[in-house]
Image: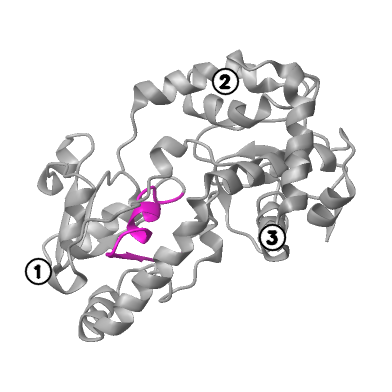
Amino acid sequence: MRNNQFLYNLKGIGYFMYPRFLGKYILKAKLHELQSLKDNELEKLAQRVRYYCSFNSGCMPNTSNPSNLKLLKKGSRYFFDTYEYMRFFPKNLIYILESGDINYELPYPSICKSRPISKNFSNNVLLKLDKMRHFKFFKNPPLIPYEDKKNILFFRGGCYQTHRKKFMQKYFNHPMCDLGHVGANREEFASWQKEKISIENHMQYKFILSLEGNDVASNLKWIMSSNSIAVMPKPKFETWFMEGTLIPNYHYIEIDYDYENLIEKLEYFLSHSNQAKEIITHANAYTKQFLDKKMEDLIAFMVLRKYFYQTNQIQISKIEEEIFIK
């Protein structure tokens, strides 16, 4: 579960040692991987590529400088996470990379970590960025049986945003909740301040609150890979995790945006433990698709291929055309 920052940076630095001229051989290998996929695997890959990259073709990025990645601080997570795949592409290709919490629709097709959830096309092209912070999963969750967990909604996190403050004001002292602010120790948060606890120790509780911050809730991925249940309103933003595809009361327990029905929902699932455990099963199954490193890398590579194709910068193979346009 824990990520090592030193090893992460060392791996990122190693990306620069990879000769760019080998990119054409990587392309050939990736196309061979596509051809070797089973029909159902290829369809799942195509669905995700189209989901992440959905802007209209012919739209060119608004920059005259190739590879504006250089504008990012080298050593940043956004830099390393993008360059992991961009190093296989020619240097002359033009693209826009937006770092940070993007909770708005971008004016031009841009590579980014997050976007508002929309049923239509989006200029925000998603890659798995800042993954050291956002993409933590339990591969072997602590074996505390669900029945033995505390009947409590648990939360530790920063409460700077208005909607998080509202939740704390409403439920901080409720007996079914154990909530705490673990960010900056300011006077306005003094009554909510509590010590951090490890992610593993969160597993003592049946329910874990997952509230969006500036964009997505960073704890949602590891909650859904555990044997506790995420409790949250329907998400407004999404990342590579495709939060927009999550089904309420199937992958997580949905509460209203005003939080009024929180206790009603907790009491219901405490008295319907089989339904609660079904949610855990569905959530665990959903997260497994992100644990296949080989497939994740292939999808990321194809998202970038589609980005450059949609902006009229490269030509594509027949199999890619079926993936991108179908």
Report helix, strand or loop for mark 2.
Answer: helix
Identified at 49% across, 39% down, the residue is 101
Quick check: is 230 in the magenta stretch? yes
Front tag of 3 and 1: 3
The local crowd at label 1, few if under 14, some if 14 to 19, many if 20 or more residues have their Cα within 10 Å, is few
Percent of width and height locating residue 31:
78, 42
Spatial distance from mark 2 to mark 1, Cα to Cα? Answer: 50 Å
Task: Please state the horizontal and vertical placement of residue 24, each as a whole percent of the image.
Answer: 79, 27
* Label annotation for residue 15: 2
Q: Is residue 142 left or right of residue 110?
A: left
Q: Nearer the viewer, mark 2 or mark 1?
A: 2
The answer, for residue 263, to whether it is visible in the render is: yes
Q: Residues within 10 Å of mark 3 (few under 14, many from 20)?
A: some
Residue 292 appears at what percent x and percent y?
A: 52, 50
Mark 3 or mark 1: which comes first in sequence? 3
SS of the residue at dot 1? loop
Secondary structure category for the residue under label 3: helix
- Answer above or below: position of 215 versus 177: above
Residue situated in front as seen by the camera: 227 or 121 = 227
Q: Are marks 2 and 3 in contact (CB under 8 Å)?
A: no
Q: Residue at x 75, y 25 (%)?
A: 23
Residue 238: x %, y % from top left: 53, 53
Q: Which residues are magenta?
A: 216-234
In which quadrant of the rendered image does the N terminus lie? Answer: top left
User: Which residue, given by chain and number where applicable, does mark 3 sit on?
Assistant: 47
Asked if the magenta segment contains residue 134, the reply would be no
Quarter assignment of residue 92:
top right
Name the residue that disc number 1 marks. 175
Disc 2, disc 1: CB below 8 Å? no
| Residue 205, quarter of the rendered image | bottom left
Can residue 125 be spotted in the picture? no
Distance from disc 3 to disc 1, alpha carbons, whole Å, reads 44 Å
